Amino acid sequence: MTKKAKIPLVLTTLILLTGCATTPPPASVALQSFQQFDARRLDDPGLKSFIVANTGVPVLIWPPRAWNFDQLNLAAFYYSPDLDVARAQWEAVKATEITAGQIPNPTVGFSPTWDETNFYHLFLPFDFNLPIETADKRQLRITGATDQARAAQYKIIATAWTIRNRLVNALIDDYAANRSITLYRRHEAAQKPIVALFEQRQASGQSLSLNASQLLVSYQQTLLAEKQAEIRRAEAEADLAAALGVPLDAVAAIDIAWKNFAMIGKNENARAAHVPAMTLKHNAQLRAALADYVAAHAALQLELAKRIPDINIGPGYDWSRNGPIYTFGLSLTLPVFNDNEGPIAEAAAKRKEAAERFNALQADIIGTIERTQAGYG
């Protein structure tokens, strides 16, 4: 084998060795066990650092004697598994931008040939193929991936608002249950001396009047309502623990500063008229749905661009007894049997689905706002 014949073999070997030098995969992520979840507490030093980092206000007493809403909200963000899932989904979608921006790799190949009829029996034909994308397909892929990443980022914000609303509802239920228990116990304490007197008369054989009988029934209803309120409080505390992402006993060990919760001011009715427009403008779920639609539109544009075939340039090299042989190949896909109609139809249908999902979500948000305003009024 001559020096000229060795050139393709050496070049191919170097390319193959370079391709084999891949980056090792990242280490596996450890899964959390029940014991790890059960060990979560609201006096965790990491939670303290998280609160300080996000508020910029030093925490002088840890844990707080009474937790305010902002501290509980940050605790929910710190421990929430839903927020972790949303971040992981954003990272997964963000990684598709790398894939979308990749330029197709060229391919190489050689076919060792043994020919007994020639003086030099071994031939090493060498082929090199360079794909060239047309119609700006790479930029369309990047645009679509960027829009999907933006949608996933908005979904993180929407998840945070969902966690916040879940926490608010749990706190409202807990507050209402505690207030109900207090009121029922006061009612019970006011009724109890009179009920005890009537019970003594009844035990001595005296008959009770209709009013006395009604009072005894009312007293039993008060006791029943008190027990039901205690059940609601237990359920609300369980919902609060779930909203915070901690076990139930971690919530039972804290006090909540109910007096520090913001009360609705007198100007709420004046502000209510601007709520629908502001909500539709800044709602994270609606922005995510809009970004999904933009990504679906970019996907349709990409499928339309695929009707223009890509070009493959394939120079080749061979060697014979008479010297080297160079070839130059040019190939492209002919749209004979299809013009990418199927993927275009699928992308168009997905874009329509994204548009309808946006419209449905917008209508649902408007309905929720109007229903809430009517209930508040």
Image: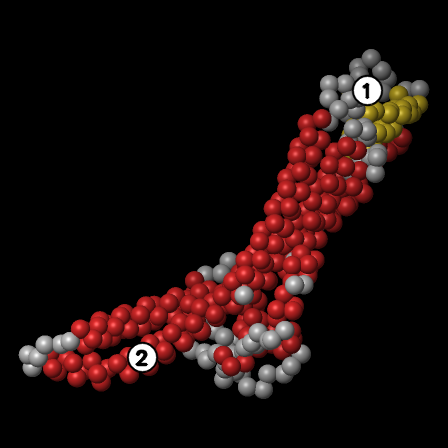
Furthest residue toward right: 322
Furthest residue toward front: 210
Crowd around label 1: few <14 · some 14–19 · many ≥20 (10 Å): few
Q: Is residue 368 above or below residue 216?
A: above
Which residue lies at the image location 58% right of the left edge and 57% below the top edge? 370
Residue kind at label 2, given as amino acid type: His
Quarter of the image where one finds residue 153: bottom right
Q: Position of residue 67 (x, y in %)?
A: 52, 79
Residue located beneath label 2 in the image: 187
Q: Position of residue 313 (x, y in %)?
A: 86, 29
Q: Is residue 133 visible?
A: yes
Q: How many marks?
A: 2
Crowd around label 2: few <14 · some 14–19 · many ≥20 (10 Å): some
Furthest residue toward left: 205
Quarter of the image where one finds residue 162: bottom right
Q: Position of residue 16 (x, y in %)?
A: 75, 39
Which residue lies at the image location 65% right of the left edge and 59% below the top edge? 276
Q: Element at badge 2?
A: helix
Residue located beneath label 1 in the image: 121
Which residue lies at the image location 67% right of the left edge and 79% below the top edge? 56
Q: Nearer the viewer, residue 316 or 162?
A: 162
Q: How is the image coloured?
A: secondary structure
Image-based side of 58 in relation to 64, left or right: right
Q: Disc 1 versus disc 2: distance between alpha carbons? A: 109 Å
Which residue lies at the image location 89% right of the left edge and 25% below the top edge? 328
Residue kind at label 1, given as amino acid type: His
Q: Is residue 278 above or below residue 62?
A: above
Locate the C terminus by quadrant: bottom right
Image-based side of 161 in relation to 341, left or right: left
Image-based side of 200 in relation to 73, left or right: left
Image-based side of 157 in relation to 208, left or right: right
Q: Is residue 163 visible?
A: no
